[in-house]
Image (cartoon, rainbow, N blue to C red):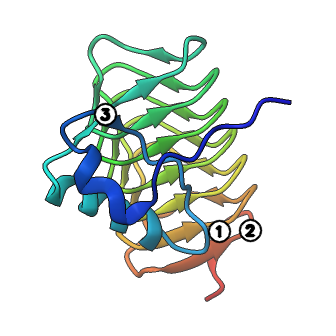
Amino acid sequence: MLYATVIGEDADIPSFARKADFVVTVGFIKNPATRIRLYESIKKAKGTLATIVASTAYVSQYASLGEGTVVMHHALVNADARVGVNAIINNFANIEHDTEIGDHTHVSTGAIVNGGCSIGRRCFIGSQAVIANGINVCDDTIIGAGSVVVKDIIQPGTYAGNPAKRIK
């Protein structure tokens, strides 16, 4: 088993800002606050955030990825998709054409965001969730695993089910 050597902590970000590129590896755990805090600390220190695309992922040459975004294995980001900063497109996620994913949003494993959708900032799309074509999801929204969103979501909260309904 290989273990990484710890070379610093969050408070040391300024001392590494000119020496290395950063990757925020914290996902969306209940909310994106920790991920956003780290991103903002790096930006404040004038650090550079790497944009990472796994070797088995596909990102169209016509798509755009914001700084600090990570696209994991077997994910797909199709033509004219736009993914904001500090986002996660997790394993096997599918971001279809003409879709926008907001800053600090996490699209979880196997989720499908169909064409022409707009997903807001600081959202979480759970594993195997499906967002139907042309749907808009407002900022600060959580979509539960396996949910199917067939109507625009205009009020922040937690949504689950098929069809997805606000539960919190």
**Image marks 1 and 2: residues in contact by CB distance under 8 Å:** yes
Please give the residue where the numbered disc 3 appears in the rendered image: 21
Type of amino acid under label 1: Ala
Circle nearer the N terminus (1, 3): 3
Q: Is residue 24 left or right of residue 147?
A: left
Considering only vertical position in the picture, is 137 above or below 135? below
Q: Secondary structure at mark 3?
A: strand
Q: Nearer the viewer, mark 3 or mark 2?
A: 3
* Labels 3 and 2: the sequence-earlier one: 3
The residue sitting at 69% across, 71% down in the picture is: 160
Instruction: Measuring from the top left, give residue 137's x and y in whole percent.
Output: 41, 63
Kind of residue at disc 2: Gly
Name which residue type carries label 3: Asp
Mark 1 or 3: the one toward you:
3
Task: Answer above or below: position of 14 versus 54.
Answer: below
Kindly identify which residue carries mark 2.
Answer: 161
Residue corresponding to mark 1: 164
Image quadrant of residue 33? bottom left
- Taking depth in this image into account, of 142 and 88 the one nearest to the observer is 88
Q: CA distance from mark 3 to mark 2?
A: 40 Å
Q: Nearer the viewer, residue 44 or 27?
A: 44
